[in-house]
Amino acid sequence: MNFAVLVNEGPYQHEAADSAYLFCRAAIEAGHRISRVFFYHDGVNNANRLSEPPQDDRNIVARWSKLAEAHGVDLVVCVAAGLRRGIKDELLPPGFRISGLGQLIEAGIEADRLVTFGD
Amino acid sequence: MLHIINKSPFDRPTLDTVLRVAQGGAALLIEDAVVAATRGCIAANKVVELAKKMPVYVLGPDLEARGLADRVIEGVQVVGYDGFVNLVAEHRNCQSWL
Amino acid sequence: MAKKFMFVNRKAPYGSIYALEALEVVLITAAFEQEVSLAFLDDGVYQLKKGMMPKGIEMKNFGPSYRALPDYDIDKFYVERESMEARGLTPEDLLVEVEVLSAQELGQLMEAQDVILSF
């Protein structure tokens, strides 16, 4: 099955980014495809390559990049929400790209399921 | 429909809203919502009510994280992330009650 | 074939950005020729209150954007009766023409959707 995921909260502050990632990983392990993860609202802060958590903590940003690299997951950051919060091309970690809200709707149209994580 | 609930019943009225509005399918408690499905929690009766309308699942890793894994009330089923994925796949649509 | 998209709004306006950014998604969805509806329950019904004047808090008034949605063929606004009444509001207090539904009716409508986006 083809899943799309929407992440509405930033990393660390709220569990949403963790839940979303663990869901994606479990879906891929079960043989499903995650076609796209769309980052909206404060979720755009998942795409900040300057994020540097303590060594004994999980690295949420790097985890997304690895997921994209290993499984071809399309990580899309909303341009309007990103601009509001200062998330621009030069801040993007590997595997992320910036695009419009149309990519969220398109994901909803094309995927079998759209699962939202937020506050 | 799979109804995904992530709020503690002490924080927001999400569980009440789902009880009122949701018409079927299944419910999954994740994140802070898992506290509602534990023995002695005064909101557990709401989970019992919900379980009369639809099967109720609770995410094990979120229970364990909070030290609540041994307190799950009867009538709800603990699942892992694999179970979460299966529940999404099994229902034709899902809604996160944010 | 067009999918049924429902936007579920359960948060009050201005106290957080969810209402405003949800509206931005709704406007984009209009371009995709899908079947779009909006549901307002819990504090979400406050998003439709007439007479918003956020000038004093220096925020953008998005009331007019709701009024513009019918111009984009988005005119299905559902309000859950209990949420509305619990807040002392009536349909006359709301800035667009709404259909007031019981919790059960709204729940059934949700069941019939393909994609539910909640903000």
Image: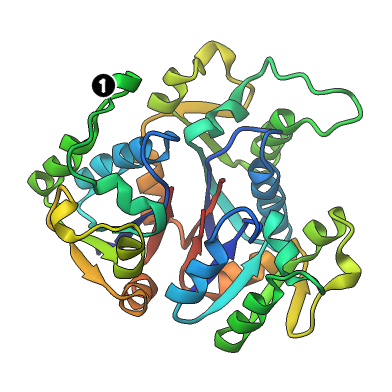
**Residue C56 position (above or below residue C75):** above
Mark 1, Cα crowd under 10 Å, few <14 / some 14-19 / many 20+, is few
Residue B15 lies left or right of residue C74; in this view the side is right
- Frontmost residue, B15 versus A74: B15
Residue A66 vs B14, above or below: the answer is above
**B86 vs C26: above or below:** below
Q: In the rendering, at what x and y percent does residue B96 appear?
A: 52, 58
Q: Residue reaching furthest bottom? A: B52
Report the front residue among C47 and B92: C47
| Residue B58 visible from this viewpoint | yes
- For residue C104, which quarter of the picture? bottom left
Identify which amino acid the numbered label 1 is placed on: Lys
Q: Chain of mark 1?
A: C
Q: Quadrant of the N terminus of chain C?
A: bottom left
- Residue for point 86% across, 63% down: B68
User: How far across and down, in percent of the image, does residue C106 sit?
Assistant: 33, 72
Residue beneath label 1, please? C55
Q: Element type at marker 1?
A: helix
Left or right of A59, for residue B4: left
Residue A1 visible, this orientation:
no
Q: Nearer the viewer, residue C46 or A117?
A: C46
Residue occupying the far top of the picture: A90
Q: Quadrant of residue A14?
A: top right
**Protein image colouring:** rainbow
Percent position (x, y) of residue C15? 43, 35
Where is residue A54 shown, x and y percent of the image?
A: 86, 23
Instruction: Spot the residue most to the left.
Output: C71
Instruction: Indicate left or right for A97 with A93 as reference.
Output: left
- Is B5 positioned to the left or the right of C95 in the image? right
For image coordinates 43% across by 18% down, the residue present is A83
User: How many dots with numbers?
Assistant: 1
Vertical position of residue C98 compared to residue B55: above or below: above
